[in-house]
Amino acid sequence: MSLLADLVNLDLSDSSEKIIAEYIWVGGSGMDMRSKARTLSGPVTDPSKLPKWNYDGSSTGQAPGQDSEVILYPQAIFKDPFRRGNNILVMCDAYTPAGEPIPTNKRHAAAEIFANPDVVAEVPWYGIEQEYTLLQKDVNWPLGWPIGGYPGPQGPYYCGIGADKSFGRDIVDAHYKACLYAGINISGINGEVMPGQWEFQVGPSVGISASDEVWIARYILERITEIAGVVVSFDPKPIPGDWNGAGAHTNYSTKSMREEGGYEIIKKAIEKLGLRHKEHISAYGEGNERRLTGHHETADINTFLWGVANRGASIRVGRDTEKEGKGYFEDRRPASNMDPYIVTSMIAETTLLWNP
Amino acid sequence: MAQILAASPTCQMRVPKHSSVIASSKLWSSVVLKQKKQSNNKVRGFRVLALQSDNSTVNRVETLLNLDTKPYTDRIIAEYIWIGGSGIDLRSKSRTIEKPVEDPSELPKWNYDGSSTGQAPGEDSEVILYPQAIFRDPFRGGNNILVICDTWTPAGEPIPTNKRAKAAEIFSNKKVTNEVPWFGIEQEYTLLQQNVKWPLGWPVGAFPGPQGPYYCGVGADKIWGRDISDAHYKACLYAGINISGTNGEVMPGQWEFQVGPSVGIDAGDHVWCARYLLERITEQAGVVLTLDPKPIEGDWNGAGCHTNYSTKSMREEGGFEVIKKAILNLSLRHKEHISAYGEGNERRLTGKHETASIDQFSWGVANRGCSIRVGRDTEAKGKGYLEDRRPASNMDPYIVTSLLAETTLLWEPTLEAEALAAQKLSLNV
């Protein structure tokens, strides 16, 4: 036992300059994460200094067998909380050998939107509230729930403590510190309304970095649940019935919204979002119709509704924002399995680049 | 199996080296988990594979939990804690703060979804958290903190379940601050086995031998859950809570800890934070905490929260007379106090099992069957404190402490009522 632990935790800095870089990308389903590691000759802090790499796209549903190479372009670097030392995690996106983004690469289009001068000038901030559910391995029933039965109804579990109310806190706390270590802008965590369900928040981050951070945070979470022998699910409605779904509420503001008179800008932005409700909803995550029912603190999927402090609305504006006349708003529609590249860039596009 | 890792991770991480089972304060959680599991918890909890597996993989979740982030970032994690809609359920969530803070006033107000805790309607759900007291976080270590908060509407009014606000007003009244009220609170609690909700150590479907051997007992047949009590003691000391002692109680599986002497509103803050730490620890141990005042019907003790109280005048020469006057006032407001001393107290205050009957007000020196007990020391020295034995274990310390201060320092009975009561209680004041 001790030998394996010592090896995994070997500090290489005494014996070698070399570091290990774990290249991470999003697979063919748009939600599965993949990674593999390579050795680099020395520490690197700038993604542009990292070599491009490639992988077998035919094994991830992203390329045909006879032309299977997909190229990885490194885009963001984070410290590796599992290997520590100078070792790194690298968030990548995927391209054909000819240099075109492959169809499942949603980062490329988002990066273009975030590079648009009109968007850059408004310094868009995002705070993303990622909800997720922990499931027992093999049975895929939520952690802490009796097999073949249900726990007591929702009420005591939100932010709850105690062995009969909180299931899986060690995973959540380990994830919090691992993300802080990695350099992710994790701003908080809490136990959610359904038992076995949790949430972490990333932000406020600017432009595309918000999405890079959310993807890496999801990667770190799934690596931790792997160690803990528990399954993480980002399904938006893991248990049908009188149990909350899981969302990824996206808080958003631009420079103008954060300054004097910002509340008017916010209201205009919400109006525009209302006119593109269908486009947004179709991009906000698969299976969202099982979650957005109008119950369980959601707005019905076909309805666009906004309100101050109203958790049953599509868009919620905080009381602080209303009072101060400036601030941000919360888009409550995205499902927990949304792609942050798509959602963040679409909100920026609709509110800053699109006109009805 | 109670061993943790055979070797601690080397080099990078400042994980304290541990050579024995009862390890450093940061790793006691795993120890408690191993020793206290009464039933097969595979369904409920999750096993970190490393501790169970045969091929000896490393326990990396624990390493991450104990990660010392100080070398990498100034940021700290603040766990905001508040009381939920039932008045006894504790809730918490955490946020990142840019750098370490000393004073609650440096922390931002926050908010939460009151509709999920029975404290606000869905269409107007924001409840605001005002940070009131800071303690060190014994689970996360480093500069991370726990923050006791109370709850307000966005308009700046305390919500109905916020009992701290009114207590804070009473404790800032000049007549009260001049008297420097001290409180020592004896929190009793019962540990239950998970799933069956039967006390820890009791045979399921049956009873242990009658009370007698368990109070402050020693031995596997008499004391159940000591690790939780001991872990809690150190966690509270670490956190900065004014914990003054612990003991095993008369009913097996029942324990007590004492917080104090604390001044004014601090007593309430410290007791609530101690309760939070206790339930977090039982969560890790796979055991259920109950603050019910009479968890098992019949010839088994209930659980109380005796509140010891003194003012400056009581602690000085001639204090015993001041104490007797205070008892007089309390006797005339017995009903008001009892109704605020915890739900379900009538099942506990029966007149048996070291309690006074709920309808009767009585006092005595060294008498545990009274509503108010005065210690022999106090009588002998002519100064000291009194013990109000009426509060139930599920009382709200903000309410009880401020009500004691109010009745004894701010309220005055009519002269006739006072004279009658003095006679009835044989109090020559």
Image: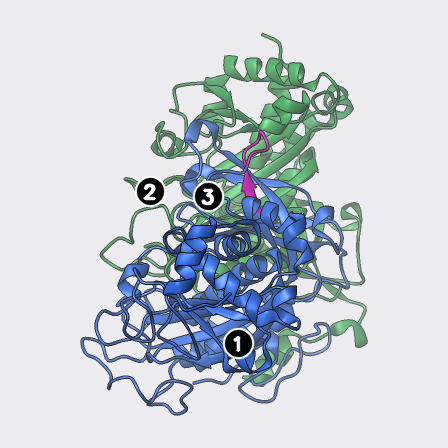
Chain colours: A green, B blue
User: How many neighbours does mark 3 have within 10 angstroms: few (below 14), some (14-19), or many (20 or more)?
Assistant: some
User: How many neighbours does mark 2 have within 10 angstroms: few (below 14), some (14-19), or many (20 or more)?
Assistant: some
Please identify the dominant SS of the magenta region: loop
What's the mark number on residue B161? 3
In the rendered view of the protein, which quadrant contains the N terminus of chain B?
Answer: bottom left
SS for tag 3?
loop
Q: Check residue B15 for magenta coloring.
A: no
Stretch of the chain drawn in magenta: B150-157
Where is residue B34 drawn, in percent x and y? 43, 79
Where is residue B297 drawn, in percent x and y? 22, 69
Dot 1 or dot 3: first in sequence order is 3
Give the residue drawn at x 74%, y 47%.
B106
Residue A214 visible in rendering = no
- The reply to whether dot 2 and dot 3 touch (C-beta < 8 Å) is no
Q: How many marks?
A: 3
Q: Which of marks 2 and 3 is in front?
A: 3
